Amino acid sequence: MSEENNNDVQNLPGVGAATAEKLVSSGYHDMLSIAVASPGQLVDSTGVSEAVARKMINAARDNMNMGFETGTEVMVRRGQVIKISCGCSSFNTLLGGGFETGAIVECFGEFGSGKTQIGHVLAVQLLKAYPNASVVYIDTENTFRPERIEQLARAAELDVEDTLSKIIVARAYNSDHQMLLAEKVDGLIKEQGKDVKLLVVDSLTAHFRAEFIGRGTLAERQQKLNRHMHTLGRLSSSNNMCVFVTNQVMSKPDQFFGDPTTAIGGHVVAHASTFRIYLRKGKKGTRVAKLIDAPNLPDGECVFEVVEGGLNDV
Ligand code: GTP
Ligand code: MG
């Protein structure tokens, strides 16, 4: 007989071996992941009826003893948050010390504003500070460059081979593939024992934008994107990982004052992101990062530049 495990999803009412397998393969490995899921998500990934999905969620919630916690307990949890340096002190300060785990951090901006560079820099900086951690890089635009990692690792005085071996790269060919890859990250952690502390999704929205064209398909796109954001949010909180996502901008022709650009993905992406940073090109090759949404930090700006060794203060 196999060992009884209270945390096993198979102990939930209405969950047999086949459903349990579907749950696990969709990333629902434990009670917590089900307790925080929505009925629709479980219906989508297992094909059970909504009533059964609700029962599963309620049972998982009872099992988890979820509910209120004291401020002290939240404080202890906050104490586990890691702040990943981007190697540039003014940028770190803007974010209260660095790119936080347990959160989705979104950078949006026009082409060449430095989004992909930040993804590369964070990967190397995380591995410098936490040599036992791993990075997952979901690359949708074929812009991940091991050569760039090599350069950055050298500048950080890290072993190049070792650094590259801790970055797990997956190329996503379309939005469904991208969503599937995100769902597989749990497996890397649970089955392969990787301590994934940074997940980069570069770009979060490009496939969605390319595949759903025209007004008629907008609702469907937003629904899918919403599901994807839920997966990313769940990953960030249940594994104390930083999910760094990049996003493009589109021009907003009706805006005459200020910067006439706005992020893709609308409210779905905006609400799901814990921190939002707007990047733009500044004078003389500099980049300006503007924090526009953060739970406990004032909005602000910093100026930096992309150099061979990473990001520099200006
Ligand atoms: P899109 O993906 O096209 O939307 O742009 P992005 O925001 O991802 O831009 P990316 O991060 O690729 O930034 C590219 C810019 O970074 C280039 O225009 C260069 O200015 C700078 N850059 C990239 N690599 C290097 C490098 O090795 N050295 C230096 N000095 N600058 C670099
Ligand atoms: Mg890019």
Image (cartoon, rainbow, N blue to C red):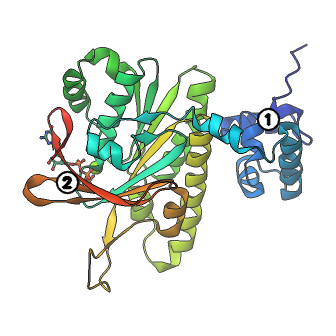
* Res. 83 image quadrant: top left
How dense is the environment of label 1, judged by Cα within 10 Å: few (below 14), some, or many (20 and up)? many
Comparing 234 with 142, the one in front is 234
Residue 255 to residue 112: above or below: below
Q: Relative to 159, does residue 168 appear above or below in the rendering?
A: below
**Cα gap from disc 1 to disc 2, whole angstroms:** 48 Å
The amino acid pointed to by label 2 is: Arg
Q: Secondary structure at mark 1?
A: helix
- The part of the image, by quadrant, that contains residue 119 is top left
- As shown in the figure, which amino acid type bears the numbered disc 1? Ala
* Label 2 Cα neighbours within 10 Å, binned few <14 / some 14-19 / many ≥20: many
Q: Residue at x 89, y 32 (%)?
A: 11
Q: Residue at x 59, y 38 (%)?
A: 78
The residue tagged 1 is 20
Residue that badge 2 annotates: 287
Residue 148 seen anywhere in this rendered image of the structure? yes
Which quadrant is the N terminus positioned in?
A: top right
**Residue sitting nearer the eye, 305 or 194:** 305
Residue 87 in the image, given as x and y percentages of width and height: 28, 35
Residue sitting at x 75%, y 43%:
70
Q: Whole-percent x and y of residue 297?
A: 45, 54
Q: Is mark 1 within 8 Å of ligand 2?
A: no
Q: Position of residue 235 (x, y in %)?
A: 59, 40
Q: Give the percent coordinates (x, y) of residue 243.
A: 48, 43
